[in-house]
Amino acid sequence: MNFYLLQIQVAAEAAKTQAEKSMTLWELTLKGGWIMIPLAILAFVAIFIFIERFLAIRKAASFESNFIDRIKDYIHEGKIDAALNLCSSTDRPVARMIEKGIKRIGRPIKEIEDSIEIVGKFEVYNLEKNLVILGVIAGIAPMFGFIGTIAGVIKIFYNISLADNISIGLIAGGLYEKMVTSAAGLLIGIIAYIFYHWLNVMIEKVVHKLELNAVNFIDLLQEPA
């Protein structure tokens, strides 16, 4: 019985020792050194831009499915003011495009198409705002990680030069900095890369909807009265 109790006690002590030697994520992050500060800033900026653009693009993509049908009814009934009011009260890119087209009713179709296209380009430009920053972060985050790798190697050789001998204890700090910064830089770069292309796919879908509704509006104007 005492033998089993001794085994349990030894196992408990081993588990306690292992827990004491284990390292939390925060402690591991601190091992990366000063280079983790710009990497953390890049990560925060990437997440902020993604959330802000995601919400803006999703809002732009959502509008009433019968919007064009209502515009069509108003125009057929000669209620141009009602159609303009509907557009101005609908805070969506498609509404602003159609509003510009309605204001050009009576002019050549080509002029109406051009005015709608110009507004559409501005709307797409607004949707793409700050996406280039995500692309930059995807490119430079791994480079910051590489800088941390170089700094870690320099630290290793510096410690060796001071002690004039080689031991695991001397090189451990530099290895931590080297591996942690490399992993963090790659991870942030991959995440920013995914965010960038994810948002671009969403924008492409919005552009398709804008083009489809613009075509439907032009067809509406060309229908027999």
Image (cartoon, helix red, strand yellow):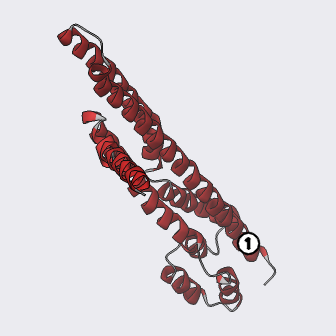
- Front residue of 58/144: it is 144
Residue shown at 70% from the left, 89% from the top: 73
Q: Position of residue 186 (x, y in %)?
A: 47, 36
The 10 Å Cα crowd at callout 1, few under 14, some 14 to 19, many 20 or more, is some
Left or right, 88 with reference to 19: right
Residue placed under numbered mark 1 in the picture: 216
- Front residue of 35/122: it is 35
Residue 171 versus residue 28 in the image, above or below: above
Q: Position of residue 1 (x, y in %)?
A: 43, 58
The answer to whether residue 97 shows anywhere in this view is no
- Front residue of 52/193: it is 193
- Front residue of 65/48: it is 48
Residue shown at 72% from the left, 70% from the top: 218
Place residue 49 in its image quadrant.
bottom left
Q: Position of residue 193 (x, y in %)?
A: 52, 44
Which residue lies most toward the front here?
1
Left or right, 14 with reference to 77: left
Residue shown at 62% from the left, 82% from the top: 64
Looking at the rendered structure, the kind of residue marked 1 is Asn
The answer to whether residue 201 shows anywhere in this view is yes
Q: Position of residue 37 (x, y in %)?
A: 27, 41
Place residue 17 in its image quadrant.
top left
Residue 57 versus residue 46 in the image, above or below: below
Residue 71 versus residue 148 in the image, above or below: below
Residue shown at 65% from the left, 61% from the top: 205
Left or right, 124 with reference to 112: left
